[in-house]
Amino acid sequence: MNTKLKKRIIDLFTGSFLFIVIIACVSAEEFKTSDRFSLLWEITGNDLQNPSYLYGTIHIYDTNIFKLPKEIYEAIDRCDNFSLEIDMNNIDQSMLMQRVFIGNPDSTLDKLLEPEIYAEIRTIPIIKMMGEQVKMFKPFFLQTYLLIDNPMTVQSVDLQLNEYAKTNKKNIFGIETMEEQLEMIDKIPLSEQAKSITEIYGYCKKENLGFHAAGKKIFGKVLNAYREQNIETIALLEKELGMISSSPGASDSVMIAERNVNMANRISDFIKQNKTLFAAVGALHLADYKNMNGVVSLLKEKGYKLRPILIKLYDSDNNQ
């Protein structure tokens, strides 16, 4: 395997996992939100000496649509510690290379997908470059490249905040580990992972668009909804994309419920030591969904006070 292709495979994890957290299996009408949903929350109570902060990110965005306001950076400045969902500064590449591939030769991508769908995705240049090896990739890791030409050239709120924290010498760690995230992915049956690709293909056919054109269209709408801090609209757009299950399945349980509980527990365990923390997680983890509480509600249940901080995601031609 040449070096360039190996790097692409490693990029698949960072691109795919950040992407899929936005495209979670959620339905807007089943969210329980307050009158005004906020992306930035101050955490106090439980005898904390100083506040910590929780922020809902979008993992892929366009700086031409919005910029992050000063309030976010000021909140990071007030904290000694910074965390994303995982520590992007420490990716175990050897572990990742082992876990990207399908282990069972009887469940390869060409057998999981209808022939016309498999043939269609093989025409995408970046996937075509992978040759016959592409059929060994778990479907989860290919979804990003169906809709985004090169995820590593797209801006990420997470990585932008991470760079700011590094520059300002914050202690940086991940709320979850890469191993945990890989295990979560493996809990989702390959057939269900493949179903998401089938639904993306169906959306493209319905809209008469190629994969990348469809991705550009839907993400433009999602980014505008995020700028308006409208969680319900984001969810509706994901439903339009066709990546929401008609009934709850493994993706709901694994990607939302289990992770929300883990995030809330670990944030609580850290800040109750009176260590200040700025924690940045995917925005959809903040809100309640069906009978699954979001991180905001879960922290409140633990006795913390969470106060929404009003912010404006500035248009690109405005100053912060």
Image: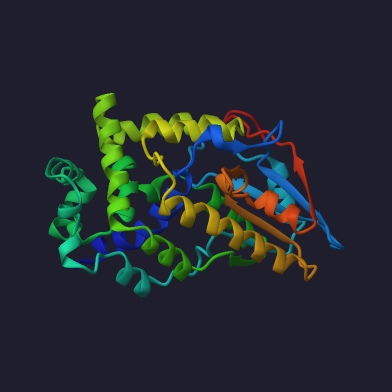
User: Quadrant of the image for the N terminus?
Assistant: bottom left
Is there any visible trace of residue 66 in the rendered image?
no
Residue 234 x/y as whole percent:
51, 34
Image quadrant assignment for residue 266: bottom right
Residue 199 x/y as whole percent:
30, 39
Position of 88 with respect to 161 (left or right) is left
Which residue sits at x=39%, y=62%? 187
Which residue is at the far bottom? 94
Residue 225 x/y as whole percent:
54, 30
Q: How is the image coloured?
A: rainbow
Residue 190 x/y as whole percent:
29, 57
Position of 135 with respect to 150 (left or right) is left
Q: Is 246 in front, or is 225?
A: 246
Which residue sits at x=30%, y=32%? 203
User: Quadrant of the image for the C terminus?
Assistant: top right
Image quadrant assignment for residue 289: top right
Position of 230 with respect to 190 (left or right) is right
Counting the numbered discs, the total is 0
Which residue sits at x=73%, y=43%? 71
Q: Is 233 in front, or is 250?
A: 250
Q: Is 180 in front, or is 195?
A: 195
When the figure is inspected, residue 260 is found, relative to residue 208, above or below; the finding is below
Is there any visible trace of residue 252 in the rendered image?
yes
Image quadrant assignment for residue 243: top left
When the figure is inspected, residue 58 is found, relative to residue 264, above or below; the finding is above
